Amino acid sequence: MKAVYPGSFDPATNGHLDILTRAARVFDTVLVTVARNPAKTPLFTMDERMAMLQVATAGLPNIEVHSFDGLLIEFVQVHGAQVIVKGLRAMSDFENEFQMALMNKKLEPTVETMFMMTANAHSYLSSSVVKELARLGGCVTGLVPDVVEEQLKIRFAEEYGGRKKG
Ligand code: PNS
């Protein structure tokens, strides 16, 4: 069975990697797909986010990294997947995820959305919190894959250097 794990992944955290690793044990193939979300201004480009996911998932043979622009359900249909996998943290995730799952069900009744509870250790993690921490010089070791930590350091060093020059 083929599943799609969508998200902004700006950048991927160890919470995302935990869901991906567990999904890869359940499904034959998992397409992790990076969304262009017009409502958000990303820190990393689509290509950068995909490249980091490629490195972070290199040890998981049944994971493919993709991107999409537009409706998620169309990506799912085009790739012949049967399931959308989502991670759920606290109650704050629930309302939005519930609404999206129902809308996707209305658009394509044969596709199921399945939720995985995030591991306790990652329940407080989000890409936004990680970016804020890194931007302010905090340590993100253990919160994100090594490749993401490196890229965050580079990005914020550039930003800081740029500001100093300006
Ligand atoms: O990591 P995020 O930002 O929470 O991911 C949300 C995402 C991109 C998976 C979600 O917004 C999405 O599926 N967007 C695509 C547009 C779509 O199909 N929306 C749902 C039906 S209207």
Image (cartoon, rainbow, N blue to C red):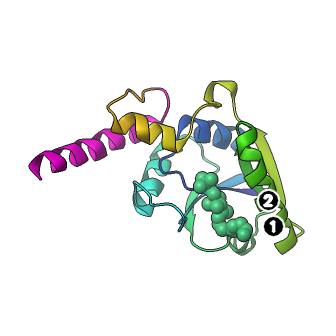
Q: Which mark is residue 128?
A: none
Residue at (63% x, 36% y) in the render: 18
Q: Are marks 1 and 2 in contact (CB under 8 Å)?
A: yes
Say whether residue 95 is left or right of residue 150.
right
Q: Ligand 1 within 8 A of label 1's CB? A: yes
Say whether residue 16 is left or right of residue 89.
left
Q: Is residue 107 above or below residue 116?
A: below
Residue to which mark 2 is pinned: 99
Task: Return the residue found at the far left.
Answer: 165
- Per the image, label 1 sits on a secondary structure element best described as helix
Q: Quadrant of ligand 1?
A: bottom right
The spot of residue 116 in percent (x, y) is 77, 41
- Rendering quarter of residue 147: top left
Q: Is residue 141 above or below residue 24?
A: above
Q: Which mark is residue 103?
A: 1
Q: Which residues are magenta?
A: 142-166
- Rendering quarter of residue 5: bottom right
